[in-house]
Amino acid sequence: MDQPVCKLTLVYPPASEAHIVEVMLNAEPPLQGFTTFEAEGHGHSFSHATMRERVRGRIARGMLIVVLPRARVASLLDEIRVKAAIADLVYWVEPVDAFGRLAPVAASSGG
């Protein structure tokens, strides 16, 4: 990526994961990839929490992280807003100082 990049994090109810993943997989222009995982929220509002979540003091959440060109963030958020319309979806954007892939180091032949 030659352009400045950033990290977009989305946090959403687990039941919304299939929908948000579908939107991300079909985003235009296509994304280079993203990561999803399970998380727990410790926010201020438990209005949609189950009884178990209220007792535990945390709410099940899904998280999605994608690194993308900074110039692409606003249009992707608009696309998510229109195509996903997920209640309680939270996001934030962070700068990324470096991004790349680490290739395995070839074994030395001795010498």
Image (cartoon, rainbow, N blue to C red):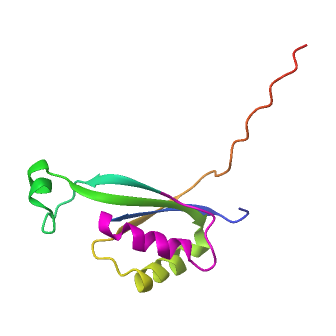
Question: Vertically, is 36 above or below 76?
Answer: above
Quarter of the view holding residue 30: bottom right
Quarter of the view holding residue 110: top right
Q: Residue at x 80, y 25 (%)?
A: 107
Measured as percent of width and height from the top left, residue 55 is found at 8, 51
Is 11 in front, or is 69? Answer: 11
Task: Give the left or right position of residue 100, taking residue 105 as reference.
Answer: left
Measured as percent of width and height from the top left, residue 13 is found at 29, 66
Q: Is residue 24 magenta?
A: yes
Question: Vertically, is 42 above or below 87?
Answer: above
* Identity of the residue furthest to the top in this view: 111
Measured as percent of width and height from the top left, residue 87 is found at 28, 76
Task: Give the left or right position of residue 20, taking residue 56 as reference.
Answer: right
Q: Is residue 10 magenta?
A: no
Task: Give the left or right position of residue 48, taking residue 35 as reference.
Answer: left
Q: Residue at x 33, y 77 (%)?
A: 86
Question: Vertically, is 61 above or below 56?
Answer: below
Quadrant into which the C terminus falls: top right
Quarter of the view holding residue 47: bottom left
* Identity of the residue furthest to the right in this view: 111
Q: Residue at x 59, y 69 (%)?
A: 70
Is 90 in front, or is 18? Answer: 18
Measured as percent of width and height from the top left, residue 48 is found at 16, 68
Quadrant into which the N terminus falls: bottom right
Question: Vertically, is 38 above or below 81?
Answer: above
Q: Residue at x 27, y 72 (%)?
A: 88
- Over which residues does the magenta segment extend? 13-35
